[in-house]
């Protein structure tokens, strides 16, 4: 009986390790991340989201991003939460592209970078606040025009020039 429970325990550990997600093969140094943030050439890949009034949810699939370049900000993010006006066409996500924005970067005491992006004339989103940690993980708070705010958690990757 002792052998059976030991084997069962090993099988469960193996199953857990086999099903867990692994870290990405490419990791970036804090200097590479900071350079990308300063040059406005990076992408935020969303992995989790948390509505203003709700629990955190895992985002499945790929293609949920915020891209920032020196001349354009674009996003394709899912949305759960309260909308104050119904979207025309039934698309409830946060999807936009803008070339009219202000970009401000500051550094906190622990090396975290805080980026504030304010969009001008966008009917979809007013503000984006991105907090980037030294390991490349990041939190993104989106303040839409006609919806409650939502927070995303994910990773920053520099874009190739």
Image: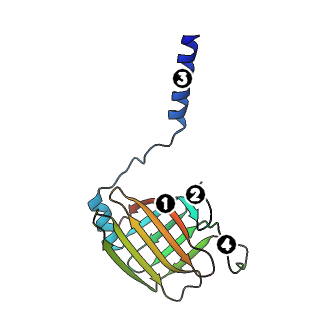
What secondary structure is marked by label 3? helix
Can you give x and y, in whole percent of width and height, for residue 102 in the image? 40, 84
Q: Quadrant of residue 104?
A: bottom left
In the rendered view, tell whether residue 37 sits above or below residue 72: above
* Residue at 59% in and 68% down: 52
Closer to the camera in the image, 96 or 150: 150
- Residue for badge 3: 9
Q: Earlier in the sequence, mark 4 or mark 3?
A: 3
Q: Element at badge 4?
A: loop
Q: Earlier in the sequence, mark 2 or mark 1?
A: 2
Quarter of the image with the N terminus in it: top right
Residue at the image position 51 percent from the left and 22 percent from the top: 10
CA neighbours of label 3 inside 10 A, class few (<14), some (14 to 19), many (20+)? few
| Mark 4, other Cα within 10 Å: few <14 / some 14–19 / many ≥20 | some
Q: Residue at x 49, y 79 (%)?
A: 127
3D distance between C-alphas at marks 2 and 1: 10 Å
Q: Please name the residue that numbered disc 1 is placed on.
A: 153
Q: Earlier in the sequence, mark 2 or mark 4?
A: 2
Q: For the residues labelled 2 and 1, say whether their Cβ atoms are less than 8 Å apart.
A: yes
Mark pair 4, 1: CA separation = 19 Å
How many angstroms separate mark 3 from mark 2 (CA)? 30 Å
Q: Which x, y percent locates residue 68?
A: 43, 73
Q: Which residue is mark 4?
A: 82
Q: Nearer the viewer, mark 4 or mark 1?
A: 4
Q: Are marks 4 and 3 in contact (CB under 8 Å)?
A: no
């Amino acid at each position: 009986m002792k052998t059976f429970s030991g084997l069962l325990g090993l099988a469960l550990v193996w199953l857990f390790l086999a099903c867990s997600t692994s870290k990405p093969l490419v990791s970036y140094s804090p200097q590479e991340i900071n350079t990308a943030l300063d040059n406005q050439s990076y992408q935020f890949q969303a992995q989790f989201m948390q509505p203003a009034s709700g629990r955190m949810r895992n985002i499945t699939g790929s293609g949920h991003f915020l891209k920032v370049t020196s001349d354009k900000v674009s996003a394709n993010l899912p949305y759960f939460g309260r909308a104050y006006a119904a979207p025309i066409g039934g698309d409830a996500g946060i999807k936009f592209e803008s070339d009219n924005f202000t970009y401000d970067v500051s550094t906190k005491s622990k090396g975290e970078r805080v980026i504030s992006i304010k969009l001008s004339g966008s009917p979809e989103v007013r503000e984006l606040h991105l907090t980037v940690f030294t390991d490349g993980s990041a939190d993104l708070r989106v303040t839409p025009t006609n919806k409650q705010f939502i927070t995303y958690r994910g990773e920053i990757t520099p874009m190739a020039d």
